[in-house]
Amino acid sequence: MDTAKCRKKALFVDRDGVIVIEDQIDSYERIIYKPHVFEALRAISRETDYELVMVSNQDGVGTPSFPYESFAGPMERILETLAGEDIAFDDINVDYSLPEDGCPGRKPGIAMLSDYLDGSYDLASSFMIGDRLTDMELARNLGAKGIWYTDKKMEIPEEYSSVIALNATSWLDIAAFLACKGIETHRTAEISRDTRETKIRLKADLDGTGKGRIETGIGFFDHMLDQVVKHSRCDISGTVDGDLFVDFHHTVEDTALVLGEAVLSALGEKRGVERYGSAVVTMDDTVALAAIDFSGRPEFMGSFRFDYDYIGDFPTELIRHFFRSFSSAARCNLYLEATEGGDSHHTAEALFKAFARALRKAVRRIPGETGISSTKGVL
Ligand SMILES: [Mg+2]
């Protein structure tokens, strides 16, 4: 029998900076919860088999500057509120000492957590969620992994690279990482790019429903970008103020670059992401095929041609340039093909639709998957 499978798993959770925003809460007024903490912890406690264990340092509780009553009332209120949201902690561990006391129970010490060290817990599959590197140190001391919860994305220090399994900036990321299927997270990016040729503002949400519009001032191009938004089911909106008095080149190129950059940024580490996507789209007299691989390497291959050099006032050569620029900025392999002889507008539209449908599949998250879809472990 595999004893590892029978052992319990724990989710050690810091309180201050993780469940509530402020540190050392000594009054009810200072209880402000972190966004989404209730829905995420509820999903974790319902859908996973982690025991919830609170681990907190509360410096100097019981001293005149932090009387026990000032700590206990707000703490009780926090636990009651969590319980009211169907979130019950299995165990609460609070250390009241001051840093200078050097108590072995104070994080990152693990003396308070001896119950978890008797072999009945699979600590290698357990996590410590905390906002400080001392919390990650605690994870290391336990033989667990750390989830470092910070306000913005951080560079993981080299010495913590083997301990920190995730740097999360939202409770929703944490719940998704712990494979809670009911949690809806949004992978988003917002890009501003100003050059002498174009000024672009663009927002993208890969977990959208196909809402939004990119306005470039080029009617045909906007129509093609509408197809991208609609058929990718990404919410994308933005404005492009380009030097159209020169020609359309800079506007088309920079729109593709910013769109690619936004998709790449929103994909983040690409955890749990499909990575590959392909689609075949037919449109009247044309069939177009698209294949995408978010491999981290840019490559574009386009096997299509147009019978006419212009669609309205739009040069058809810019269509190839758009896709090449996108693959370069999104660092993806992109292959596009279309049958010959079709109406040029149909060929272009089928290509954009096939691209969007392939994109939709490639950025899709696999429910419950937290790994990276590569034998290298990185994309
Ligand atoms: Mg903290």
Image (cartoon, rainbow, N blue to C red):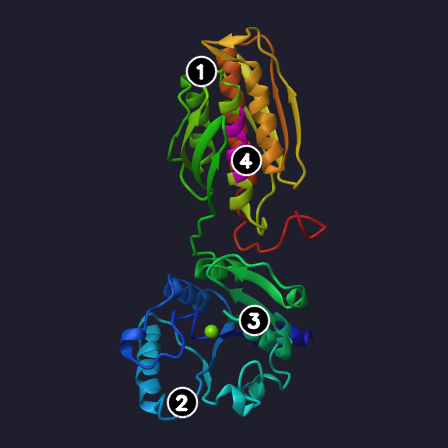
Residue 361 found in image quarter: top right
**Callout 1, which amino acid?**
Phe
Instruction: Say the numbered circle drawn on residue 245.
Output: 1
What separation in Å lies between label 2 and label 4 (alpha carbons)?
52 Å
SS for callout 3: helix
> Which circle, 2 or 4, is nearer the viewer?
2
Is-magenta flag for residue 6?
no
Q: Position of residue 9 (x, y in %)?
A: 56, 74
* Magenta segment: 253-261
Residue pushed farthest front?
196
**Callout 3, which amino acid?**
Leu
Mark 4 and mark 3 in contact? Answer it, CB < 8 Å.
no
Q: Who is closer to the viewer here, 237 or 158?
A: 158
**Callout 2, which amino acid?**
Val
What separation in Å lies between label 4 and label 3 (alpha carbons)?
33 Å
Instruction: Say the numbered circle drawn on residue 133.
Output: 3
What separation in Å lies between label 1 and label 2 (alpha carbons)?
69 Å
Residue at horizontal 49 percent and vertical 16 percent from the top = 246
Q: Is residue 22 above or below residue 178?
A: below
> Which circle, 4 or 1, is nearer the viewer?
1
> Which circle, 3 or 1, is nearer the viewer?
1
